């Protein structure tokens, strides 16, 4: 099996594993389930790709984190204000969710099942959360300088996550009820929400006398 074939099959295994983990949960999922749905023998799955379910879980989570955090790190390195960075962060977050619609379901199911397991997966590489720490630090600095409205990090983070992730979590019912089951129209709706969410977050952070939309 050449390198290209290995990479193609590895991608298929990861995508299949995401779906199986979401559908059955981590504990109930067996490696044989993933191998069968991916169209690969269990022995080949062990030998060529992932020897344990934990290794496969970590590979999925690494892929999801990697799709977001490097770009977030690049944004945080820019010598700009939070109000200038925020639209770029929201665009990046939105793209990750659209490209990985199982991401929020996967994370929520793991948080419900075993939050310590998910946290330990994140902390296996602490450098990955540096952009988030930098973001929180700059927000606090700009609040103290009067450039941002004083708001608790838990309020701002939970507001952004709910605005971005909830429409992805309820995609099926919203598509059926409001868009006659048209998946393409729902994709367009998610794209259209980006400036809407950006406006809400900018208004939340902006001091009353410095609202960029005034």
Image: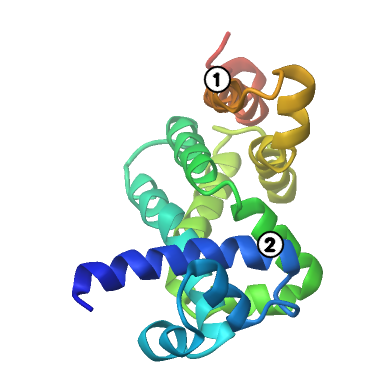
Residue wearing tag 1? 192
Residue drawn 66% across and 60% down?
A: 106
Residue drawn 63% across and 37% down?
A: 164
Task: Tell which of 208 and 4 is nearer to you.
Answer: 4
Q: Which residue is farthest left?
A: 2
Circle 1: element type: helix
User: Residue 131: image x %, image y %?
Assistant: 45, 57
Image quadrant holding the C terminus, namely: top right
Q: Is residue 25 visible?
A: yes
Circle 2: element type: helix
> Callout 1 environment at 10 Å: few (<14), some (14 to 19), or many (20+)?
few
Mark 2 or 1: the one toward you = 2
> Callout 2 environment at 10 Å: few (<14), some (14 to 19), or many (20+)?
some
Residue wearing tag 2? 22
Task: Tell which of 71 and 183 is nearer to you.
Answer: 183
Please tell me in which quadrant of the rendered image residue 195 appears.
top right
- Classify residue 194 as left or right of residue 117: left
Q: Earlier in the sequence, mark 2 or mark 1?
A: 2
Task: Tell which of 173 and 106 is nearer to you.
Answer: 173
Q: Are marks 2 and 1 in contact (CB under 8 Å)?
A: no
- Classify residue 192 as left or right of residue 20: left
- Classify residue 212 as left or right of residue 7: right
Q: Is residue 127 above or below residue 202?
A: below
The label number, if any, that marks residue 72 in the structure image: none
Task: Tell which of 131 and 140 is nearer to you.
Answer: 131
The scheme the figure's colours follow is rainbow
Q: Is residue 158 above or below residue 6?
A: above
Q: Is residue 69 above or below residue 99?
A: below
Q: Is residue 136 above or below residue 190?
A: below
């Amino acid at each position: 099996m050449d390198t290209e074939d290995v990479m193609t099959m590895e991608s298929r295994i990861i995508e299949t594993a995401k779906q199986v983990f979401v559908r059955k949960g981590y504990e109930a999922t067996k490696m044989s389930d993933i191998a069968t749905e991916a169209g690969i023998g269990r022995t080949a799955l062990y030998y060529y790709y992932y020897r344990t379910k934990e290794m496969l879980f970590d590979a999925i989570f690494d892929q999801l984190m990697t799709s977001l955090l490097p770009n977030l790190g690049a944004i945080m390195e820019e010598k700009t204000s939070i109000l200038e960075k925020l639209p770029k962060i929201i665009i990046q977050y939105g793209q990750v969710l659209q490209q990985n619609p199982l991401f929020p379901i996967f994370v929520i199911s793991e948080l419900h099942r075993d939050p310590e397991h998910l946290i330990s997966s994140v902390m296996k590489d602490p450098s990955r959360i540096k952009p988030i720490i930098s973001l929180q630090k700059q927000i606090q600095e700009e609040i103290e300088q009067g450039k941002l409205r004083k708001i608790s990090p838990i309020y701002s983070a939970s507001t952004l996550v709910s605005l971005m992730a909830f429409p992805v979590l309820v995609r099926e019912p919203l598509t059926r009820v409001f868009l006659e089951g048209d998946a393409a129209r729902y994709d367009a709706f998610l794209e259209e929400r980006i400036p809407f969410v950006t406006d809400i977050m900018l208004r939340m952070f902006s001091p009353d006398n410095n609202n960029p939309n005034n």
